[in-house]
Image (cartoon, rainbow, N blue to C red):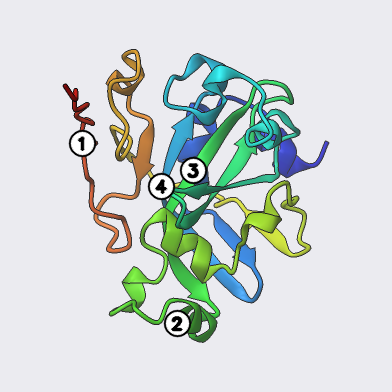
Amino acid sequence: MTPLAALLSRRADEVAPLLLGAVLTGRGVSVRLTEVEAYLGETDPGSHAFRGVTPRTRTMYGEPAHLYVYLSYGVHACVNVVCSPAGEASAVLLRAGEVVEGVELARGRRPTARRDAELARGPGNLTRALGIALTDDTAALDGAPFALAPAPHPPAPATGKRVGVSGHGGTDAFPLRFWIPGDPTVSVYRASTPRVRVTRP
């Protein structure tokens, strides 16, 4: 097992704060991670894996140190780092970061960003800045084309509720979102909006 896989071979809520300050590199761009969320597999009603193995979630059940990429709301590709031993299906969603290398490439991929701090702010934007596509699901973090370099000394995180997730069996009573306090690239927190079911006569 590689040192990275060993680091990631634990629960997502233990791994998540260790990823703050880590640098993810892919396709000419490097992003220093500033905001992440933990998803705890079949014990977490907010996780894609809560209902078990499906074609969509199969990657989450694999070995740690791989990417799990999924389509959110039919629009945005979002990227997660698979963690925990194989079979446990926990993962860390990468929510935001600072582009530290390849800024011009990232600007080309994110032409609507008004400031560099916005290039990888938000999970869909982070994925675009790094050039990650749905076809990168299962990709290994071994340097070709993606590499993850943990920070030697991860910063002390702030913690809170996950973005847009609520009403999931009490899971979000726990602080499963982690971010670097005061960092300008951290996304704006938005609580989930409960869906209203309309009953037709």
Task: Give the amino acid at mark 2.
Answer: Arg
Q: Which mark is residue 93?
A: 3
Three-letter amino acid code of the residue under disc 1: Thr
Front of the two marks 3 and 1:
1
100 or 168: nearer the eye?
A: 168
Where is mark 4, residue-wise?
Answer: 155
Cα–Cα span, label 4 and label 1: 31 Å
| Position in image of residue 127 (x %, y %) | 52, 61
Q: Which residue is mark 2?
A: 107
Q: Mark 2: few, some, or many residues within 10 Å (few <14, many ≥20)?
A: many
**Residue 118: percent from left, percent from top:** 33, 70
Q: Residue at x 52, y 39 (%)?
A: 92
Instruction: Classify 10 Å Cα crowding around label 3: few (below 14), some (14-19), many (20 and above).
Output: many
First of labels 3, 4 by sequence position: 3
Residue of label 1: 193
Image quadrant where one finds the N terminus: top right
Give whichever of discs 3 and 2 has the lower sequence position. 3
Kindly indicate whether the residue at mark 1 contacts the one at mark 4 (C-beta within 8 angstroms): no
Real-space Cα distance between discs 4 and 2? 27 Å
Discs 2/1, front: 1
